[in-house]
Image (cartoon, rainbow, N blue to C red):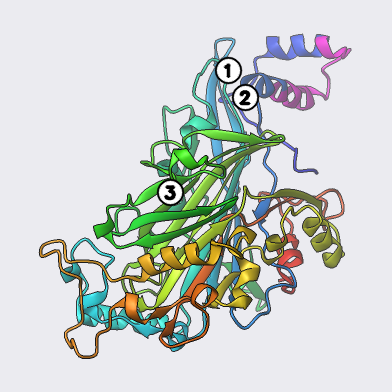
Amino acid sequence: MSTNSRRRGSDGPIPRRELLAAAGALGLVSLSGCVDDIQGRVEDEAAGRLVSMTAASPSFFYAGGSHRTGERQHAETSYTQESIPIVASGELEGVSRTVELEGIHTDSTAKAQDYNSVRSNKRRSEVDFGDDGDDLDEDTLDRLYEYLDDEPTVSQRFVVVVPDASVTGHEQSLADAITPEILLEQLAAEPSRLDGEGSVYAWGRAKAGTETGNLYCWGDNHSRAADSGGDNEIRCRTTHLAIDTDGSSRGIAVERMGEGVAVCTVPGDEGEPSWRFVPDDLDDDDGDGVPTRLESWGEETSVGETTMSSCLVGAVTVQPPGCPCPMPALFHARRFRHDDQLLYVGGWIIDDAPLYEHSVTMLVADGPNDIVDVEHGDDFAAMRRAAESGFTRDRGRFGSVCYDGEFNRESLAYLPPAFHEGDGPQRLASISKRSARTGRNPQTGKEIQGTDDDEYHHYGDRLRFPLADGDGEGEAMRGLVGALDCPIVRVDPGESCHNGCCCPSRDCECNWLPAMNGQSPR
């Protein structure tokens, strides 16, 4: 069964008169023994007239393939894919009907080993990401640094794919219904029954073990449990986004050069907005992004057959499992319309600047995300080559891998080419030093400092950005760099995938993600 298969339903049985009419239209002589078949055909025909599109294709961020083995990298190791039950409701020829739509959610997380070992913790009085510094006491901060000193989750990405559907007789499309705010609420929700009674579209997080609750996982995101027969069974752990969109007091700053863009957080006293749209293309006279709320995806642009929103970036706090308190992070998300489907892609990455001295987190891009289609097969290397052949930039081969190290020559492979030469390194140095600077007390206006003034050094005097400043005295700026323009891979399972069915809602296993990240099949 292909990814274009459809599963549809209605509120009740099809009337016999309607069945007879359908039989005549299909040229059937007798209904004997064919009622079930005819009813299914009529329901399919009615559903097709009620809802424009119902199918979704499995999609995910490219995971780096063979380019995820460097010492200064953080690569995703845990993946979960689950079906999203979506029901569209409407009325056709006076009859209320519901149509089940396919939705697929793929989530991935990256962990780090001894994250603190190469970083210098800020004093509590210098940590400046909350609205009120008093809400993060010394004990809580110590526990946060202990968490970061072990094996913390430092980034998380998601891809949600649903059909670009509309319901006959209703102006609101599914794209209109899924705002950034609704998407975040959905991804943060615990598995539950479908809600939204009385709405055109209802959706929820599926419960594992139910008809619509199939989960698949790869890497570290599963456990083995012995069933009653004594065999080991893989049990996947569902994942959730634990994000506070108002949790950080920091602002979003954008640096542009040519087609390249770099995004960092800066202290709140600079007055930058905490959320921005970051367009792929921006004329010099238009400014660096537009402050926004989470009520819409903003303006869209088109490249070929793909239409996309600007990238929405925000300063947030997150609290992944095991983390003792919220920690600062950079969030990003955007919407694509591609091949009659909607792709919502994004994630978060830990924000180093509020927590560590001479260290920043930077999201970069030099154009929109590549979307490449590959067919499922048994040759993983061939699948990777097929995906990489569709990338339009060299940086795409690193996929979702994050660079973690000094801004030196090695870092150039992860940075947009526009920042490699000329004024590029200096512009990166400028936004990085703005981000790493300790903010000012909102009551006194004075720069936040540690209690021991003799040991404290102003960041402007001690920071050195190697690409711009070269070798010399002072602390070298360290960066955690993630790609806003990470390629997206869509898989057409075809008929060769195990039992011939590969959507998460089907009873089979698939190994698309291991083919893209070099991991062994589960």
Whether the magenta-drawn stretch holds residue 26 is answered as yes
Q: Would you say residue 224 is visible in this rendering?
A: no
Nearest to the eye among marks 1 and 3: give it: 3
Task: Identify the mark at residue 51; answer none if there is no mark.
Answer: 2
Image coords of residue 6 (percent x, y):
71, 35
| As drawn, 499 above or below 409 | above
Q: CA distance from mark 2 to mark 3?
A: 25 Å
The residue carrying mark 3 is 184
The residue that appears at 34% across and 53% down in the rendered structure is 245
Q: Amino acid under label 1? A: Thr
Q: CA distance from mark 1 to mark 3?
A: 27 Å
Q: Amino acid under label 3? A: Leu
The residue carrying mark 1 is 168
Q: CA distance from mark 2 to mark 1?
A: 6 Å
Return the residue nearer the eye: 495 or 230: 495
User: Which quadrant of the structure image shows residue 217?
Assistant: bottom right
Q: Amino acid under label 2? A: Val
Whether the magenta-drawn stretch holds residue 373 is answered as no
Return the residue nearer the eye: 173 or 521: 173
Magenta residues span 25-44
